[in-house]
Image: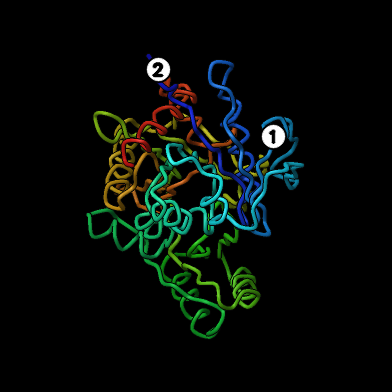
Amino acid sequence: MNAEPRPLDGVILLFGGTSSERRVSVASAQHLARAFDAADPVPSCWFWDSDGAVVEAHPAELLGMEQPFETEFRTNGERHWPDLPTALDAGARRDGVFLLALHGGAGEDGTVQRWLEDRRLAFTGTGSEASAHAFDKALAQEIVWSHGLRVPESCVIDGRDLFRAGEVLEMLLDRHGKAVLKPVADGSGLGLCIVRDPSDLEKAIDALRASPTVGHLAEAFVDGVELTVGVIDGPDGARALPCSEVRIAPGRAFDFAAKYLGRGAIEITPAEVDPKVARNAQDAALVAHRALGCYGYSRTDLIADESGAVFLETNTLPGLTGASFLPQQLDAADIPLRSFIADQIALARKRR
């Protein structure tokens, strides 16, 4: 009689990518790999390089890497393919599961998910259509607003019409005292700009001018407590994890340096807020998770003001690094990371 397959058999850990968030992806993959043990050793590690090529890296290379947020990952792996679709066609097991540690760009906007779906390959996280909807911050706000969530006043602008962009930012500045400018489709705080006064307005216009075709979301700055809430799916449906609170140093923004290099922000999990505030934020995260069609897990960023939670964005492949919010929240909920991984693998197999 054949033995039952182990839960983590046939897993391929896919990380890297061509986006600006590839270093976060490497750090997430490293943290996930450390959760495996002798009974279920580290799975195959596929590194998607910035030039588009895919290399099967040795787990020891990933586990032994130092300062993944600040240096590029390099591998001496011998098995390689010119691009990810070719790798999926030639190197993937039909009964395997891709454990996605990708962030940003094609790894999170639905592109990779569509490649996997087209080949009937199982993978963790949200499907292609919902990934695309959530990755577009403006569209995501429209969707969750239609399901009853509050969203900031906002408008999409770019550097091809700097006069209009300046007018929009000035209008938000006049109405709300401060405005936020961020790429419509990016994450990890990359490209985030807070407009507090006319001098910041010039910096924002310069950022648009530097990348004229990149769509940016200009939105009202909402004063309140900054919270982020993970949601995980399970046998009994979606469950909101404990909230995390972000406290920003004066004059700083919650950008890449604050998130991953410990500069200018304090993260508190569970959040030190009134239980009613936390419950309201968790309820809003659950609404966003369901409204956007997320699967497996997600993380929603919100501001809690005097009237309740205001939706900012949902991440369908949030960071899973040692410094990331979701692992903090799993720990606060007494859910081991290894159990979370096994559950996500099971959900991926079930969906297939």
At mark 1, the secondary structure is loop
Q: Indicate the position of residue 277 as horizontal and vertical percent values.
A: 33, 37
- What amino acid is found at the position of numbered circle 1 in the picture? His
* Point 46% across, 58% down: residue: 109
* Point 67% across, 52% down: residue: 49
Label 1 to label 2, Cα distance in Å?
Answer: 29 Å
Mark 1 residue crowding within 10 angstroms, few (<14) / some (14–19) / many (20+): some
At mark 2, the secondary structure is loop
Q: Indicate the position of residue 326 as horizontal and vertical percent values.
A: 47, 35
Front residue of 188/12: it is 12
Mark 2 residue crowding within 10 angstroms, few (<14) / some (14–19) / many (20+): few
- Quadrant location of the C terminus in the rendered image: top left
Q: Indicate the position of residue 300 as horizontal and vertical percent values.
A: 40, 46
- Quadrant location of the N terminus in the rendered image: top left
First of labels 1, 2 by sequence position: 2
Front residue of 121/218: it is 121
* Point 36% across, 48% down: residue: 305
Q: Is residue 44 above or below residue 304?
A: above
* Point 29% across, 34% down: residue: 276
- The residue that disc 2 covers is 2
- What amino acid is found at the position of numbered circle 2 in the picture? Asn
Left or right side of 323 for 178: left
- The residue that disc 1 covers is 58
